[in-house]
Amino acid sequence: MKILTGPCVLEDRDTVMRIAEKLKPLSEDKRVEFYFKASFDKANRTSLDSFRGPGLDEGLKLFQEIKEQFGYKLVTDIHESHQAAPAGEVLDVLQIPAFLCRQTDLLVAAAKTNCKVNIKKGQFLASGSMKHPVDKVLKTRGCDEVSYENSDKHGVWLCERGNTFGYGALVVDMKNLIAMREYAPVIFDATHSAQVPSTGGTTGGNSAVVPSLAKAAAAVGVDGFFFETHTDPSVALSDGPNMVQVDELYKVIDDIFAIQEVLGFN
């Protein structure tokens, strides 16, 4: 089971390294294919005044330190095509943000690296529409047929994070998890699915629903989970309201494995 987890954004070095240390037991869990996730730049913050991160150059230095100290495989999102090549020298997975999942230049630039590509489904798209971003990456990598098997072979994933439902709300249609697996391995983003978008100058959320959403996805059957986590979400510099505290994350993951074992998914 793939688990992508870490803070929303690279904060100060001490905070990031403390979170990385707390996740070490999870990285050593034999049931888990572990990836440490954080962003060097949150280019889609609601407010111009919100914290964005250290930027590409300083962010890559910190990612390199994490890799050297902990041996983690690393995930980050990119927002512009010129970021793909330098990020690809350090990172193992490049993530395409949901709002940008149709951006051809960004997808092609990510596909030209040696990284896996995790494409987040836009909150505005049907599951069937995600065949086309997958096709762009696969064709760039020399494959003309979109299928789960080809995407798995060529390192292309899809990530579900809910759909816009009216104003200021997201809803997760669990049928999407089934439908998108026709095209690629599917990661369920349990914490962003708990967001309450653009409440005033920031994006809110309800982390209390994260365990239930994750367990529901585990019962449907997915290839992995994405969780943003922090030692203290109340002081996190981005996405704190929908984050899971690190110690609580371990209980959620144990529940996921218990459900999948009962249903024979392991």
Image (cartoon, rainbow, N blue to C red):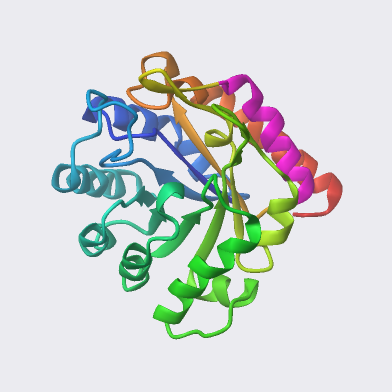
Q: Nearer the viewer, residue 181 or 229?
A: 181
Q: Identify the residue shown where x is 29% and y is 43%.
A: 66
Q: Nearer the viewer, residue 140 or 74?
A: 140
Is residue 171 rendered magenta in the image? no
Is residue 212 rendered magenta in the image? yes
Q: Identify the residue shown where x is 54% and y is 26%.
A: 168
* Count of numbered tags: 0
**Residue 96's image quarter?**
bottom left
| Left or right: residue 152 compared with residue 256 | left
Q: Is residue 232 above or below residue 192?
A: above
Q: What percent of the width, then of the height, locates residue 26?
A: 52, 39
Q: Is residue 95 above or below residue 227?
A: below
Q: What percent of the width, then of the height, locates residue 125?
A: 57, 52
Q: What percent of the width, then of the height, locates residue 265?
A: 78, 54
Q: What percent of the width, then of the height, locates residue 14?
A: 25, 26
Magenta extent: 206-221
Q: Is residue 135 above or below residue 45?
A: below
Q: Identify the residue shown where x is 59% and y is 62%.
A: 129
Q: Residue furthest front?
A: 166
Identify the main secondary structure in magenta: helix
Q: Residue furthest top?
A: 234
| Left or right: residue 102 compared with residue 167 | left
Picture quarter with the C terminus: bottom right
**Residue 163's image quarter?**
top right
